[in-house]
Image: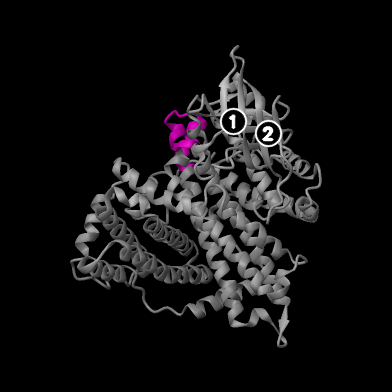
């Protein structure tokens, strides 16, 4: 296990919004230790040797193939990276388990299957099971002998998980719970051996159960035919007087929501990691195609329009990676802090993930949308060939789309981002009032444009600080103006969420670039600085657009004019030649002939 850096200041969830973060304290991918890099390399080798050569057979849902691949992954320890050693796992830290999700993220349907198995298929039992339940199931799941799945979604309850209709009642002899209902869109459902299933005891107590394949009254439907991730087993589950042993109740009666929502926090971050892995491979595919495809007697990689696309892929991937591992280390450090305070391992990680649930929601949105952007532009660079199944970029395009839907739709995660921030502020967990009032007073003052601009990264740091002020100004005014009605103004909330997502990722990229420049010198970080400064330059316009749309939706007259002037001030940037920066980024990509980091 890793340990927090001595004297390190550990920010609470969302506290980056009101406090300055230190680049020295920020974990960056370049900080991986040798063992972590070896694990990441092992994942890449597994995909190249075991998965990608049979990807066509996987998409045909060849019977037994996916379970056999999961078993092979189990033999190499890839199913139990962070599982305690007492249950057959490796007991590694959260950074390492995140690296596994990224390293296997380019495996198309296999990536979905292994993420579901190691995440929602295993973690509910690991974190909420009794000792007997963990001893019975976790070693088999860790080794790959048994495969895991998770039944939450129903035909009429998707985002509204608590609206589930599946019921459970205790039998007259008290030995079984009798389940009735159905679940849909169940990943790994066609071959799993054990399922975490949610139902309402006596019609109202939302609870979780461990259901094994073969239990009386439990059946499954045929495989769904999907737009993408065709090789991922997806079925409906049916429960008709299904007899589940009473000892297979998971957690407390009526507390199933705690299991469902806590597991989602980790799942959202891990989805971002998998999307990142997929984006890196799709970018490499596109870079290599652009280098070999010729038009007008030259490689298309030499055209400015293509350079722009390749560079923008790299920018968004690099920024996503920066925020992902910054957050993963925050969770890891918080877990160590809770363990040191005497918390058991399950409560420590769940508590750490809950602390940074806001960041996890933002990562899910950003990571899934980065992958969508990369594969979409990848198809465009491929031209007509990108629309052909003979080129793998078309498969990447189809498989990507699901990521914006599961683990909570991106709309739900945007709304949750702001909702969780406001609730923490109301409960006193996050002091937003003081900083928001300070920003309000600043609107009435004459701006100071040049203090400290001669210091390294001063302008970049000031830009990010100003972005934060824009968020506080818009969010504070919206809450003050709309009061309790703000929760019904979803458009406004999503605009504010977009401002927060852009700012958190811009700051994460900047902290990474600053740390690298301190370690290597600015001259050795040209690529990283071009990426960071181009992103911040573009983010300013996106933040201004989101802020302006939010302000215009709830403010009028003098209040509106003052806020729009303040927003313009907070998103002001110096002139920057982003065309030349992107050309330099694209030149490095073409020179390396792959995504380099």
Q: Are marks 1 and 2 in contact (CB under 8 Å)?
A: yes
Q: Residues within 10 Å of mark 2 (few under 14, many from 20)?
A: many
Q: Residues within 10 Å of mark 1 (few under 14, many from 20)?
A: many
Q: Which residues are magenta?
A: 332-351
Is 328 one of the magenta-colored residues? no
Is 342 one of the magenta-colored residues? yes
In the image, residue 110 above or below residue 313: above
Name the residue: 59% across, 45% down.
Answer: 96
Residue 27 in view, yes or no = no
| Scheme by which the image is coloured | one colour
In the image, residue 592 above or below residue 472: below
SS for dot 2: helix
Q: Which quadrant would the N terminus be assigned to in this image?
A: top right
Q: Which residue is mark 1?
A: 125
Residue 436 in view, yes or no = yes
Farthest residue, direction top? 173
Q: Position of residue 252 (x, y in %)?
A: 50, 25
Name the residue: 31% across, 64% down.
Answer: 551
Q: Which quadrant would the C terminus be assigned to in this image?
A: bottom right
The disc placed on residue 141 is 2
Q: Earlier in the sequence, mark 1 or mark 2?
A: 1
């Amino acid at each position: 296990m890793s340990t927090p850096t001595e004297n390190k200041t550990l920010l609470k969830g969302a506290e980056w919004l009101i406090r300055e973060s230190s680049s020295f304290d920020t974990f960056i991918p370049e900080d991986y230790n040798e063992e972590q890099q070896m694990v990441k390399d092992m994942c890449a080798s597994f995909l190249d040797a075991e998965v990608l050569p049979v990807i066509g057979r996987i998409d045909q849902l060849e019977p037994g193939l996916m379970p056999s691949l999961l078993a092979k992954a189990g033999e190499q320890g890839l199913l139990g990276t962070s599982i305690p050693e007492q249950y057959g796992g490796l007991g590694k830290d959260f950074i390492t388990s995140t690296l596994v999700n990224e390293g296997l993220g380019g495996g198309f349907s296999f990536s979905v299957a292994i993420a579901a198995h190691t995440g929602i298929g295993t973690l509910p039992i690991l974190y909420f099971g009794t000792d007997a339940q963990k001893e019975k199931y976790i070693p088999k799941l860790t080794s790959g002998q048994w495969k895991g799945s998770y039944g939450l979604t129903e035909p009429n309850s998707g985002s509204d998980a608590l609206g589930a209709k599946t019921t459970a009642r205790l039998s007259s002899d008290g030995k079984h719970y009798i389940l009735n209902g159905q679940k849909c869109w169940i990943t790994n459902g066609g071959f799993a051996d054990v399922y975490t299933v949610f139902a309402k005891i006596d019609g109202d107590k939302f609870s979780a159960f461990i259901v094994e394949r073969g239990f009386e009254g439990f059946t499954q439907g045929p495989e769904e035919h999907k737009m993408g991730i065709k090789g991922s087993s997806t079925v409906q589950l049916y429960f008709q007087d299904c007899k589940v042993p009473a000892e297979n109740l998971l957690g407390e009666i009526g507390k199933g929501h705690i299991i469902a929502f806590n597991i989602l926090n980790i799942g959202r971050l891990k989805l971002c990691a998998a999307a990142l892995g997929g984006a890196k491979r799709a970018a490499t595919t596109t870079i290599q195609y652009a280098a070999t495809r010729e038009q007008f007697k030259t490689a298309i990689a030499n055209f400015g329009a293509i350079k722009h696309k390749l560079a923008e892929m790299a920018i968004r991937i690099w920024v996503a990676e920066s925020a992902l591992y910054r957050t993963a280390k925050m969770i890891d450090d918080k877990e160590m802090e809770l363990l040191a305070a005497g918390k058991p391992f399950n409560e420590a990680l769940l508590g750490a993930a809950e602390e940074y649930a806001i960041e996890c929601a933002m990562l899910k949105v950003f990571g899934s949308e980065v992958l969508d952007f990369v594969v979409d532009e990848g198809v465009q660079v491929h031209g007509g060939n990108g629309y052909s199944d003979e080129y793998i970029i078309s498969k990447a395009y189809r498989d990507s789309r699901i990521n914006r839907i599961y683990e909570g739709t991106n709309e739900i995660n945007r709304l949750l981002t702001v909702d969780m921030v406001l609730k923490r502020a109301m409960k006193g967990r996050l002091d937003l009032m003081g900083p928001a009032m300070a920003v309000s007073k600043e609107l009435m003052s004459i701006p100071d444009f040049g203090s400290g601009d001669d210091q390294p990264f001063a302008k970049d740091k000031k830009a990010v600080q100003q972005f934060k002020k824009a968020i506080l100004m818009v969010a504070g005014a919206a809450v003050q103006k709309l009061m309790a009605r703000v929760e019904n103004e979803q458009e406004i909330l999503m605009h504010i969420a977009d401002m927060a997502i852009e700012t958190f990722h811009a700051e994460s990229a900047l902290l990474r670039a600053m740390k690298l420049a301190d370690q290597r010198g600015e001259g050795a970080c040209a690529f990283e600085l071009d990426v960071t400064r181009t992103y911040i330059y573009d983010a300013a316009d996106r933040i201004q657009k989101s802020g302006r749309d939010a302000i215009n939706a709830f403010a009028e007259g003098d209040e509106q004019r003052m806020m729009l002037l303040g927003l313009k001030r907070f998103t002001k940037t110096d002139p920057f030649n982003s065309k030349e920066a992107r050309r330099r980024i694209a030149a490095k990509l073409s020179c390396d002939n792959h995504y380099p980091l």
